[in-house]
């Protein structure tokens, strides 16, 4: 028997315990069955509302004109949607606005805290979206003041307020009301190749991975943020300093999952890369995410790319952005691909990064795959 909503609620609280005590367990089970069906229907209805709300937010964010921008801010400020749908999160809305709106309009409207007092997270994300797109915050008064209004405990407060040189050539998604397109540039370049000759040695290195849990989590921060399929990190300390030209031959011999089973003639390709290209790859990984997963957008993508650069370059825990940049610029960076079982070698879904520290006695490795 199908009960009306109010009747079902009354029976659950008024008769379930009594009927069970009387031995009528099938009656109680039937109540549970109806509740389960209605719960599933309600969950699906919530998902429908979330999809519809995300579409409305996207339409307002992308549609040109000040009125659509004001209406969007009013909606977000008054209703403060609690949904976890990625299309309504402040970081996603900020990314859309930075892509489609005039900077002057955003500075004058979004950063007006006296009107929109509930949108600090949106402002924090939008600020760094604009920085990454080359906006000089010193030229716009609302942006210049915002850096002083963001609380020091906020994660994004750690980031530099001006775009650094190696952040200048990054990739952003292209989005419309109906869809989006993006990709992570992980292909190995033809220039600066330093592939070791084959056959390579089959002798394994005696070095041991000494990465602590904290260091491991720092190195893989960008890949984790992008919700890729799998990732690994390793750190090796050398007995003596070595020159960068010895890294290509050493890497395939290290005890790492990403090179397990690699034979002397299996493909191992590697190139020396500028820090800017490594940062670009890490940023795209975190900000745009994997093939079937959403990333964390520009502001938090910037944060987690910096975190991974810090871990790979060996910057000390708690280092400032300036210290990380200095350490990264003095390190030697490599990008590699391997025909080993750990990697699947799908297009734009696998890469390896290795870093030789400035003192040339520390090697850090990050391997990432978007095929799980």
Image: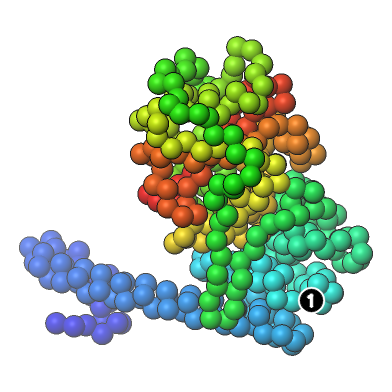
Q: Is residue 280 above or below residue 107?
A: above
- The N terminus is located in which quarter? bottom left
Q: Position of residue 87 (x, y in %)?
A: 55, 71
The reply, left or right, for residue 81 in relation to residue 95 is: left
In this rendering, does residue 343 appear at all?
yes
Q: Position of residue 127 (x, y in %)?
A: 76, 61
Closest to the observer, 321 or 69: 321
Element marked by disc 1: loop
Q: Is residue 15 above or below residue 339?
A: below
Residue in view at x 55 percent, y 22 percent: 236
Q: Which residue is mark 1?
A: 102
Q: Residue furthest left?
A: 23
In this rendering, does residue 353 appear at all?
no
Q: Is residue 158 above or below residue 358?
A: below
Residue in view at x 53 percent, y 66 percent: 86
Q: Is residue 135 above or below residue 283?
A: below
The reply, left or right, for residue 260 in relation to residue 363 is: left
Residue in view at x 55 percent, y 47 percent: 188
Closest to the observer, 273 or 5: 273
Tell me which corner region of the image, top left, top right, bottom left or bottom right, holds residue 123.
bottom right
Q: Residue furthest top?
A: 239
The reply, left or right, for residue 123 in relation to residue 43 is: right
């Amino acid at each position: 028997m199908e009960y009306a909503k109010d009747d079902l609620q009354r029976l659950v609280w008024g008769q379930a315990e009594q009927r069970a005590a009387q031995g009528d367990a099938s009656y109680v089970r039937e109540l549970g069955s109806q509740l389960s069906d209605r719960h599933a229907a309600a969950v699906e209805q919530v998902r429908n509302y979330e999809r519809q709300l995300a579409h409305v937010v996207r339409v307002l964010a992308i549609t040109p004109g000040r009125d659509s921008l004001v209406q969007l801010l009013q909606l977000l400020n008054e209703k403060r949607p609690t949904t976890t749908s990625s299309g309504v999160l402040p970081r996603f809305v900020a990314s859309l606005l930075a892509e489609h709106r005039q900077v002057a309009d955003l500075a004058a409207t979004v950063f007006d805290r006296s009107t929109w007092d509930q949108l600090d997270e949106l402002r924090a994300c939008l600020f760094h979206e604009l920085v990454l797109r080359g906006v000089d915050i010193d030229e716009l008064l609302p942006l210049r003041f915002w850096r002083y209004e963001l609380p020091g405990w906020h994660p994004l407060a750690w980031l530099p307020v001006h775009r650094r040189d190696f952040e200048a050539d990054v990739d952003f998604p292209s989005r419309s009301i109906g869809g989006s397109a993006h990709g992570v540039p992980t292909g190995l370049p033809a220039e600066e190749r330093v592939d070791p000759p084959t056959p390579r040695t089959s002798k394994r290195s005696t070095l041991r991975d000494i990465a602590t849990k904290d260091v491991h989590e720092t190195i893989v921060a960008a890949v984790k943020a992008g919700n890729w399929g799998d990732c690994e990190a390793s750190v090796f300390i050398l007995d003596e300093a070595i020159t960068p030209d010895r890294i290509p031959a050493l890497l395939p011999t290290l005890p790492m999952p990403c090179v397990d089973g690699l034979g002397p003639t299996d493909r191992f390709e590697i190139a020396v890369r500028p820090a800017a290209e490594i940062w670009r790859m890490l940023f795209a990984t975190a900000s745009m995410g994997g093939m079937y997963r959403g990333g964390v957008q520009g502001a938090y993508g910037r944060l987690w790319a910096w975190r991974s650069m810090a871990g790979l370059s060996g910057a000390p825990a708690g280092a400032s952005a300036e210290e990380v940049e200095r350490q990264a610029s003095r390190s030697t960076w490599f990008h590699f691909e391997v025909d080993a079982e750990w990697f699947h070698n799908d297009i734009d879904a696998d890469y390896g990064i290795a870093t030789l520290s400035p003192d040339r006695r520390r090697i850090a490795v990050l391997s990432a795959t978007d095929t799980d």
